[in-house]
Amino acid sequence: VNDNAIPSEHAAKFGRLPVQWQGRIVPMNTFSSEILRKLYKAERIGTLDSDQFLLSVLALPQMWMQIPFIVYSNNDMAREYGLSEDAFSYGEAFDDEGRYKFAAALQEAFATPPAQRDKYDKDLIKADEKVNTLYQLFHHTLPAVFPPHAGTQHQWYSPGGDLSAFSGEDSLFVSTVFDEYLSEVRLSVKSGNWQKADAHLASIADYQQKKDIVSQIRPEKIQAEVRYNRLHIFQTCKKGYLILGGLLLLLSLTSFFYRWKYFTLMEKSLFWGMVAVFAYHVYGMALRWYISGYAPWSNSYETMVYVSWATVLAGLILGRKNSIILSLAVLFAGMILFVSGLQWMDPQITPLVPVLKSPWLMFHVAVIASAYGFFGFGFLLGTATISWMAFGKKEASVERRIRELTLMNQLSLLTGLALMTIGIFLGAVWANESWGRYWGWDPKETWALIVMVAYAVVTHLHLVKRWNNAWLFNLCSVFAFTTVLMTFLGVNYLLSGMHSYGHTEGAPRIFGYILLFYGLVSVLGVVSFRKRRASF
């Protein structure tokens, strides 16, 4: 592969070529990134980036048919079909006589109702999708490169597809130029001279600009999307939040025992570093908004990114004078971005379905997700306070710290409750606009109401004299967050309903980690209760 690698300079030009994919006009770089993630579950394959990979697959199909890079995870499939472990090649999916090995089993899998399919059926269907994707690439029915230039049709055409809609010089051009370009790519790989390949690529781009009357390619958006893809903004923010938050937390805890001469300077440096990462986070969300044309909180991935932003915002507002509070908020935001980057979260930008194209939805989700951020911040503060109660000594400084954290927790939960209440009313207006009713007891609606009621109870515990203590309030603030997790993750991945637009397989594993965490919190709760019950 390395001996036939496409130079990154030419691949970058190829990556800026507009194509139609999933209902949008996107740079080839977006298409190649999604194809590589689908087939190989990574951003790079060896030393090749996604553009180098895709162009190599298109130009050198015979080589890639023999390379095992179609990732799967099913030992039964490996044994039954004689596949390479962890990843198989396109050629391994066919026997010596050219018959498709998966054909018979696929018929049974597709005949089984989706709800009754086992892991083997699901893995087999996924493998078949990947083989079919490669088949389309090898035969050039993907990607869709040529725009329609007459009538009202918005469907673009692929070089290996039906090109009968074109006539005259256009027909001659679209039927030959892509094959000629790939031929020049193969020659350039051997010679090292990429001038002719560059010229053919430029001619395709010029043709697109001249003939695209219907879709109106916007070069500035294409460039913005390429920049967004290459910067990996939210991955950078994740690393920044985890590193800076961890350092600030370590510095803050160390300050209880040793007061360094440069403590204040280091604390300010870390604070402004967090502000810089937060600004970069805002830039990433704004760039995604510009590219997609809608607010970037319309699916599971985008909402996770937005909630992490809201969590840092809550930390900057409520914890700017308390380094421990701020560090916990930033660390939590980093963990949220880490979860958003897992394979079961799809970062793909897709067109909105009609029911989501409402300004009421934009405000509804923004307000609700902000509430989740403040509830998450309260969850962190509650966990930290319970930990202080369990392990801290009964000293004046510790008691003062517990009071500070509890007060911040109260402010955070009250802010979140206000936002949640407003968000539910905004959602009701959107529901009436979309479905003609304000409330329908959809799982998401029901659980949003449960969240509001749960936090209303937690924030009013102090009105009952025997429940008016910091231990109970903080412990309840931690367990109340389970309603948020159920609303945000459980409804999307365990239940079904009109709100479950982001459903993706692979998520249930995270619920095991959540149960483990709450088991540990329960232990902390018992320890802290035994240590503090005399003061209740």
Image: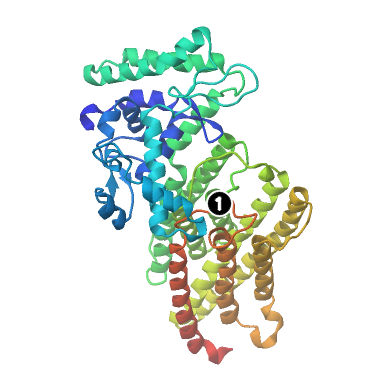
Q: Is label 1 in a helix, a strand or a loop?
A: loop
Most foreground residue, 493 or 361: 493
Q: Is residue 115 above or below residue 405?
A: above
* Residue lying farthest to the left in this orientation: 3
Q: Is residue 312 above or below residue 27?
A: below
Measured as percent of width and height from the top left, residue 240 is found at 42, 50
Measured as percent of width and height from the top left, residue 370 is found at 62, 56
Quick check: 425 left or right of 492?
right
Measured as percent of width and height from the top left, residue 535 is found at 56, 89
Residue drawn at x 56%, y 69% as measured from the top left: 482
Say which quadrant the C terminus sits in.
bottom right
Residue 343 visible here: no
Q: Amino acid at mark 1?
A: Gly
Measured as percent of width and height from the top left, residue 55 is found at 35, 27
Say which quadrant the N terminus sits in.
top left
Residue 363 visible here: yes
* Residue lying farthest to the top in this orientation: 168
Residue drawn at x 61%, y 55% as measured from the top left: 369
The residue that mark 1 highlights is: 502
